[in-house]
Image (cartoon, grey):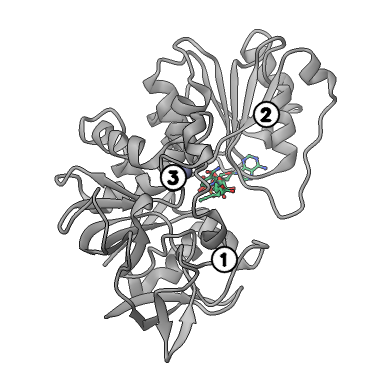
């Protein structure tokens, strides 16, 4: 079949709208009509050329929602007309990683997914007989996609696609980091570095679990108002204080119980660790730093009880946890609508990247 898609032909170039050939689902695969997709910072990271694993030409996009159109032989967990969210972190439930119960990083198809290919090492996308690569196993900048069954979360049919697409990455990453990675308790003092599409979701989850102080740190003063609506109690603009770590330690009677780095800046990662409380503070890195970057601190920070951790896709097991997060949104426990600041047609997808670069959007969503 044919599919309209925004293709990244090479790094640093705008996406171009093409009509691609899409081969049908093979054994264990699912054909999805994507109804909506968010544009995330990570798509820009790859498009910019900063991602050492970036492969071109490719169909980017990893934050979508849609409907199952067809399934290949052997698929049992979803069927035609099911509403679904494709997962860039699959959940096979039988690899060593899934069975460990210690991580959400299923590795069953990691090798081929990282090469822009389906599990049988081929691409379903092509143009004029030449392959176009998949991206993060999802490629939601295409109206139709083929994905492995283990990378499909079935969700309730009454949830709006233009909102729940954001659960495909940003919402789950931020909310999950609080609930699945940190397992934060009520009454905790929390610091969130970076109040963008991820950080605001950390804030709303911290509020949901009953955190006490929720301190936001951002150099963009325009982010303060939205963050307060989502539960932030204190705002620090690093440009307005002499020392961010000291300011946080004073506000929290010795340091935060939890901090989250949601920018991808190694200087902030150090501050995020060092502003946590001696003896028990936990600092969780969510932001993706540039290739080759390294973090540093004095080891005594760890000797004296602070813990440095990381979180990918919020620690969520996609097929199990994503449907629950959709339910939380539909039950009014999570807010998404206000975070979707811009809606675009596929033809205007490059405008979504420009809005992100100018810091004007939280999330732009493309509607097919
Ligand atoms: P975003 O651009 O929406 O937000 C980043 C925020 O950081 C902005 O508000 C910006 O003003 C602020 N900021 C920039 N420099 C700062 C500084 N020096 N001090 C304080 N604030 C600063 O980005 P996002 O979509 O929220 O993504 C944040 C990071 O999370 C990115 O690195 C992204 O790649 C990463 N990410 C990680 C995962 C994961 O699973 N770990 C998933 C998705 C995204
Ligand atoms: O198992 O090695 C692996 C792949 C892990 C992927 C984790 C992705 C989280 C960071 C990238 C941001 C995605 C939007
Ligand atoms: Zn697995």
The residue located at (84%, 23%) in the rendering is: 299
Question: Can the viewer see residue 150 in this picture?
Answer: yes
Mark count: 3
Q: Nearer the viewer, mark 3 or mark 1?
A: 1
The quarter of the image holding the C terminus is: bottom left
Q: Which residue is mark 2?
A: 272
Q: Secondary structure at mark 3?
A: helix
Q: Which residue is mark 3?
A: 170
Label 2, label 3: how far apart the Cα atoms are: 20 Å
Residue 156 picture location, percent across and down: 18, 42
- Say above or below: 289 vs 229: below
Q: Secondary structure at mark 1?
A: loop
Q: Nearer the viewer, mark 1 or mark 2?
A: 1
Q: Between residues 26 and 167, which one lies in front from this camera angle?
A: 26
The residue located at (45%, 73%) in the rendering is: 123
Q: Nearer the viewer, mark 2 or mark 3?
A: 3
Question: Can the viewer see residue 231 in this picture?
Answer: no
Label 3 CB less than 8 angstroms from ligand 1: yes
Q: Along the polypeptide, which appears first: circle 3 or circle 1?
A: 1
The numbered dot on residue 115 is: 1
Label 2 CB less than 8 angstroms from ligand 1: no
Label 3, label 1: how far apart the Cα atoms are: 23 Å
The residue located at (34%, 66%) in the rendering is: 146
Q: Between residues 322 and 349, which one lies in front from this camera angle?
A: 322
Crowding near the residue tagged with mark 1, few <14, some 14–19, many ≥20 C-alpha atoms within 10 Å: some
């Amino acid at each position: 079949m044919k599919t309209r898609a925004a293709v990244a032909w090479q790094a640093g170039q705008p996406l171009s709208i093409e009509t691609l050939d899409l081969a049908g689902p093979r054994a264990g695969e699912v054909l999805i009509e994507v109804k909506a997709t968010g544009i995330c910072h990570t798509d820009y990271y790859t498009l910019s050329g900063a991602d050492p694993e970036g492969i071109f030409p490719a169909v980017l996009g990893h934050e979508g929602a849609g409907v199952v159109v067809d399934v290949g032989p052997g698929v049992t967990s979803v069927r035609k007309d099911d509403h679904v969210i494709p997962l860039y972190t699959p959940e096979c439930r039988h690899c060593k990683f899934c069975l460990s119960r210690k991580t959400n990083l299923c590795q069953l198809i990691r090798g081929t997914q990282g090469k822009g290919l389906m599990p049988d090492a081929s691409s379903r996308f092509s143009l004029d007989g030449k392959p176009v690569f998949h991206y993060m196993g999802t490629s939601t900048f295409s109206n139709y996609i083929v994905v492995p069954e283990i990378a499909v979360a079935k969700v309730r049919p009454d949830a709006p696609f233009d909102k729940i697409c954001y659960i495909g990455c940003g919402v789950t990453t931020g909310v999950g980091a609080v609930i699945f990675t940190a397992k934060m308790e009520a009454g905790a003092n929390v610091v969130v570095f970076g109040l963008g599409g991820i950080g605001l979701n950390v804030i709303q989850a911290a509020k949901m679990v009953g955190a006490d102080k929720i301190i936001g740190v951002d150099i963009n003063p325009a982010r303060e108002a939205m963050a307060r609506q989502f539960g932030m109690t204190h705002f620090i603009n690093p440009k307005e204080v002499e020392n961010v770590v000291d300011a946080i330690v004073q506000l929290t009677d010795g340091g935060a119980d939890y901090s989250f780095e949601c920018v991808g800046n190694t200087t902030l990662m150090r501050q995020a660790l060092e502003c946590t409380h001696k003896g028990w503070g936990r600092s969780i890195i969510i932001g993706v730093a540039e290739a080759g970057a390294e973090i540093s601190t004095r080891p005594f920070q760890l000797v004296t009880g602070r813990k440095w951790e990381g979180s990918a896709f919020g620690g969520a097991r996609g097929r199990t946890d994503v449907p629950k997060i959709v339910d939380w949104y539909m039950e009014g426990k999570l807010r998404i609508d206000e975070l979707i600041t811009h809606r675009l047609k596929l033809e205007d997808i490059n405008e979504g990247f420009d809005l992100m670069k100018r810091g004007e959007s939280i999330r732009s969503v493309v509607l097919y």
